[in-house]
Amino acid sequence: MSRTKSALLGALVLLAGASGTAVAAVPPDAAGIAAIPCTVDYKVQNQWDTGFTAAVTVTNNSAAKSSWAVKWAYAGNQKVTSGWNAKISQSGAAVTAANETYNGTLATGGSVSFGFNASYSGTNALPTSFTLDGVTCNVDDGSGGGGGGGGSDPSGRVDNPYAGAKVYVNPEWSAKAAAETGGSRISNQPTGVWLDRIAAINGASGSMGLRAHLDAALAQKGSGEEVVQLVVYDLPGRDCAALASNGELGPTEIDKYKTQFIDPIAAILADSKYASLRIVTTIEIDSLPNLVTNTGSRATATPQCDTMLANGNYVKGVGYALAKLGAIPNVYNYLDAGHHGWIGWDDNFAPSATLFKQAATSEGATVDDVAGFITNTANYSALKENNFTINDTVNGTSVRQSKWVDWNRYVDELSFAQGFRNQLVSVGFNSGIGMLIDTSRNGWGGTARPTGPGATTSVDTYVDGGRYDRRIHVGNWCNQAGAGLGERPQASPATGIDAYVWMKPPGESDGSSSAIANDEGKGFDRMCDPTYTGNPRNNNNMSGALPNAPLSGHWFSAQFQQLMTNAYPPL
Ligand code: BGC
């Protein structure tokens, strides 16, 4: 979420000019700085002997556009080989990146991001000049980099921690992946490190503890920047609408959560030894959204969620975690925001943003403790459905009336994450927040992937025939049959998105298919049993789960193999 200081001031001056009332918002040192028509942030994210991957973010400070083209020239022999989120062409040293049909709109103050792979030999010198529709832009070569809006942070945090950084490869996950046939194709990908119980801080059952991971991350870091991705996951009465990941703390054990879980984690993260790492903490998967959707008079309510709403311990726990971890300057908190097939309905969308704001301003936390939000964690929602949009109709009937969409406002995760980001900003979160999307298991490739839209016989044939997401119901969440690996982890993939991440490590189970005794606090949820016929939260559909699954978090070879087979993009 980068803008250099000068670019941000440029935008403020423009605003002041337009409204005549915003002058007070302009810091004193802004006086006399002319508006900059556009800024370009060009970052080499990854480079090897013969090639590199680059991410480009363009911010438009002039009149709104419905199409755009960015141009630059290389001094060396760089050749673009493939691009995404822009149509990129090259003639000699001159490169043109023009909008795709879906991202031509560029508001005043808005940003758009695209990326590409290129070959080169010798020196990969950065281009020195860019134009947007023929007008010269300034070049943002600051340390930030990344997606949409935002400004500098008094703590010294960069706007998007992923921009220009490597991401920690968990050696334990990597070894399990590499031991699978074909697994070495992905075993060097970064995945999340789950702190899913108190014992995980020092290392549960012989596995690496938090310090061991951070030490390994320092070793991987070298002289560059390094992101470490942690999942902070041990709320009292955790995951109140499911059983597979209920966790070790009872509904009232908020003090234990604070003093035996969050405080020790914070003490380790604050160690000056780790100050050079960019530590991404994803805060408490699944729990807050449950307070919105699974409480009160709703058919989906559970007594456990009603209890957690009434005792306030989810809100307090999240607020405490944000405040404690947010006080550490190199920690970037991303709060869990469910996914489109959960929060995307009108009844859930605005109330969720309001609840997140409440949690983020409790127990001493402020919105400045929130770097952004993560969606689709450990879920299966497709990133982008290309064969239909929410605005489509069939014979005059909206796709919103199809059984699959069922009046949701969103059909995929990218549109949801971008839309929800706007909602979060509108309730008071900082405009610089960025979204993460977990793409570990939402690829839906393989032979069952539709190659075009469904038949226009009815909204159901149209949606069901065209959708990539092959689940039986969008509420299904456990070890889904047919799923594949999604987009590989990458920084700044789209407007407002800080990164695509693999927060759920592919190959780790979501829950056991039958009851298994354990000392991890894990229950048996029949949503993980392939013979289960469902409950109100998946509208009484079959669970769609793979058979013979081990406990949540345990290695599930058959699932790992299926994810590779059905990867999209393919491996
Ligand atoms: C489990 C955790 C595990 C995580 C990542 C969750 O469903 O409850 O124990 O670490 O998944 O696989």
Image: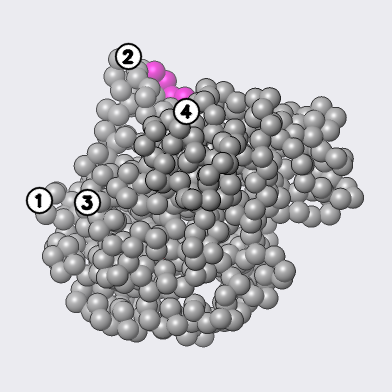
Residue indicated by mark 1? 297
Instruction: Give the residue drawn at x 71%, y 35%.
Output: 130
* Camera-nearest residue between 217 and 190: 217
Name the magenta segment's main secondary structure.
Answer: loop
Name the element at disc 2.
Answer: loop
- Magenta residues span 451-456
Residue 139 position within the rendered picture, expressed as x and y whole percent measured from the top left: 68, 43
Residue indicated by mark 3? 293
Residue indicated by mark 4? 387
Residue 121 position within the rendered picture, expressed as x and y whole percent measured from the top left: 88, 47
Instruction: Give the residue drawn at x 49%, y 50%.
Output: 28
From the viewer's perspective, is residue 238 above or below residue 428? Answer: below
From the viewer's perspective, is residue 552 above or below residue 517? Answer: above
Name the element at disc 3.
Answer: helix
Outermost residue to the left = 297
Compare marks 3 and 2 and give the one earlier in the sequence.
3
Query: What whole-number distance in Å separates the C-alpha atoms at marks 4 and 3?
Result: 29 Å
Query: What whole-number distance in Å separates the C-alpha atoms at marks 1 and 4?
Result: 36 Å
Instruction: Give the residue drawn at x 45%, y 46%.
Output: 26
* Camera-nearest residue between 381 and 358: 358
Dot 2, crowdedness within 10 Å: few (<14), some or many (≥20)?
Answer: few
Which of the labelled discs sits on residue 395, or is there none? 2
